[in-house]
Amino acid sequence: MNGESLDASGTLTAPGFARVAAVFDAQLAAGLHHGAQLCVRLGGKIVVDRWGGFADRARARPVLRDTPFMAYSATKAFTAACVHLLSDRGLLDLDGPVAAIWPAFGRHGKESITIRQLLTHQAGIPGKTGAAELLSWLSPRAAARRVAGMKPVHAPGARTMYHSTSAGWALGEIIRRVSGLEAAEFLRREFLEPLGMRDSFPGLPPREYRRASRIHSGDRRQALAAAVFSNPLYRSLYLPAASLNTTASDLAVFYDMLRAGGERSGRRYLSSGAVAGATAMRHDGPDGDSGLRVRWASGFGLGGYSPFPDEDIRHMGRGADERSFGHSGQGGCAFGWADPSSGLVFAFTCNRFLELKAAHARFRDLADACWGALGR
């Protein structure tokens, strides 16, 4: 297979990438997660395709290449791609007010909030997850009404504060109003199905729950999030900011399309200009809530920095810079990114949350092994 080596499990490791496979295996052996998948592409070709461990704590179901994992906030990149596609088609203005499309949103000081400010976490409506919000997730319309009723905590554009779910619901409503399709259906039609992402689901169908990986937490502060989405009902819902279920191999396909400027297998999904605009730096500085350094493009995070002032933990690894783009999921449960200059695409899924610094270190060690294979 063009020089790649397959082990007894059917996983693939290209020459020079043995260290990547070794780090992946060592993380499983150390108990950082119960099960995981890793897919790395270089110049469009798979160089690492590896999976291992178990989909449940009882160790009854081995993780397979097609085992769906919950991606949490890695979903945000897909919703952003949908919004950029509508902009690409001339159907919305990213720098125009949300209220021009959705009049009910333009209340309580939100009249001037732009679509781009939702994408860059600068809209001023970060929100907090509580019982009322969890109940609103049961209906996209209820969730949208809840966001429309929010009051900004700062002037739009004045600060950058991570919007965990609120901006996603707003973007989902914009997609619905402009396209006439629910956000999940638009994503399926425009990206998942034509890209051949057969094991990716915007909300896990009940029929798929039995083969999907369960969710666990190694951080007590994230135990509630693990519990909520371990419930089959909530796992079946689609939150445009947080609930794509996918595999590392599917995630790598999506980012390889973006790496190639929006084209794959002869089909254009986004214009090269749209990809460039989506991944251009919009903020490099502190997050207004955590105080940690962040780099945001319009719906994507960027590489080349460590958020921690006391430790160098670059989650895209030592070879990434501000041109490297992607998005991770809660507790380090998923991460997809691309580096167009090197042609490297990285996609990882696992089933155990870690606290923030440990999650970044998990990503860094895998990413550094990839950069090492490129001599960087």
Image (spheres, rainbow, N blue to C red):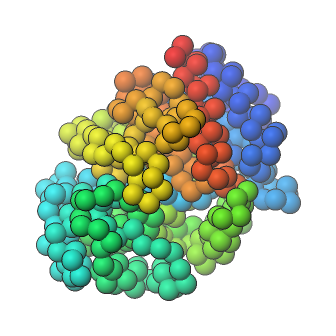
Q: Position of residue 222 (x, y in %)?
A: 64, 64
Q: Nearer the viewer, residue 303 or 231?
A: 303
Above or below, comparing residue 364 to residue 226 in the picture: above
Q: Determine if residue 252 is in view.
A: no
At 43% from the left and 45% from the top, the residue drawn is 293
At 65% from the left and 71% from the top, the residue drawn is 224
Horizontally, residue 218 falls left or right of residue 111, namely right
At 58% from the left and 19% from the top, the residue drawn is 372
At 54% from the left and 45% from the top, the residue drawn is 335
Q: Nearer the viewer, residue 365 or 307?
A: 307
How many numbered marks have been drawn onto this rendered protein structure? 0
Q: Position of residue 135 (x, y in %)?
A: 52, 85
Horizontally, residue 192 falls left or right of residue 101, namely right
Which residue ends up furthest to the front in the rendered image?
Answer: 310
Q: Position of residue 338 (x, y in %)?
A: 43, 35
Above or below, comparing residue 244 to residue 133 in the picture: above
Q: Determine if residue 203 is in view.
A: yes
Image quarter of residue 4: top right
Q: Position of residue 354 (x, y in %)?
A: 67, 52
Q: Quadrant of the N terminus?
A: top right
Horizontally, residue 50 falls left or right of residue 194, namely right
